[in-house]
Image: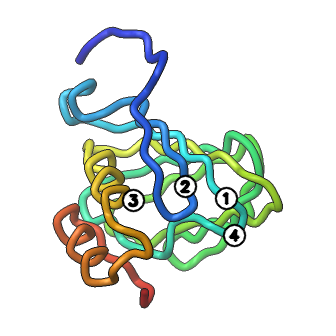
Amino acid sequence: MQTKRVIEPEQTNFSGMSCDLLVTQDDAEGLFNVIEMRVAPQMGAPLHISFDEYKFFKIIGGSFEFYAADEVWNLQTGDSAMVKKGDKHGFKNIGETMATIMLVSSPSRHVDFFKEMAALATPHDPKQVMEVCERNRQQLLVTL
């Protein structure tokens, strides 16, 4: 693991989210990622399963409808949530302006997933999205 100051993180954009890749697998020897996501209104992460990752989410600003296991929570600035690997989860910005959510995931897999999603042409081809998900051990639980 490197000791460093993160001044200008790598960024990626897809599906209504602008993401700062604050801690990558190279930074943390594959142990964890930290990603700050700015999410457009009514956008977010569809219901899905991350088979290998434990996740911690912190609402930095705004309001989110957050789905975890079989529950739905309205999370506001300052709230947080944890998701066990293999549990279905997702979130949506329910506000009228951009909202910000921080993700810490372990082990470090989500940066690669975000980069692959951002590289897809828009509108996304559902087959290509499913291939990216499969490579990154994610399963969407919604139809594209």
Disc on res. 17: 2
Residue 128 visible from this viewpoint: yes
Nearer mark to the viewer, of 4 and 3 = 4
Which image quarter: residue 26?
top left
* SS for dot 2: strand
To which residue does mark 3 refer? 84
Give the crowd class for mark 2: few <14, some 14-19, many >=20 residues within 10 Å: many
Disc on res. 138: none
42 vs 54: above or below: below
Q: Nearer the viewer, residue 9 or 78?
A: 9
Q: Are marks 1 and 3 in contact (CB under 8 Å)?
A: no
44 vs 144: above or below: above
The amino acid type found where label 4 is placed reads Gln
28 vs 11: above or below: above
To which residue does mark 1 refer? 40
- Mark sitting earlier along the chain (1/3): 1
The amino acid type found where label 2 is placed reads Met
Q: What whole-number distance in Å separates the C-alpha atoms at marks 1 and 3?
A: 26 Å
Query: Does residue 78 appear to the left or right of 8 in the view shown?
Result: right
Quarter in which the N terminus is drawn: top left
- Mark sitting earlier along the chain (2/3): 2
The structure residue drawn at horizontal position 26% and vertical position 65%, both measured from the top left corner, is 51
Disc on res. 42: 4
* SS for dot 3: loop
Q: Are marks 4 and 1 in contact (CB under 8 Å)?
A: yes
Q: Are marks 2 and 1 in contact (CB under 8 Å)?
A: yes
122 vs 115: above or below: below
The amino acid type found where label 1 is placed reads Ala
The structure residue drawn at horizontal position 46% and vertical position 58%, both measured from the top left corner, is 14
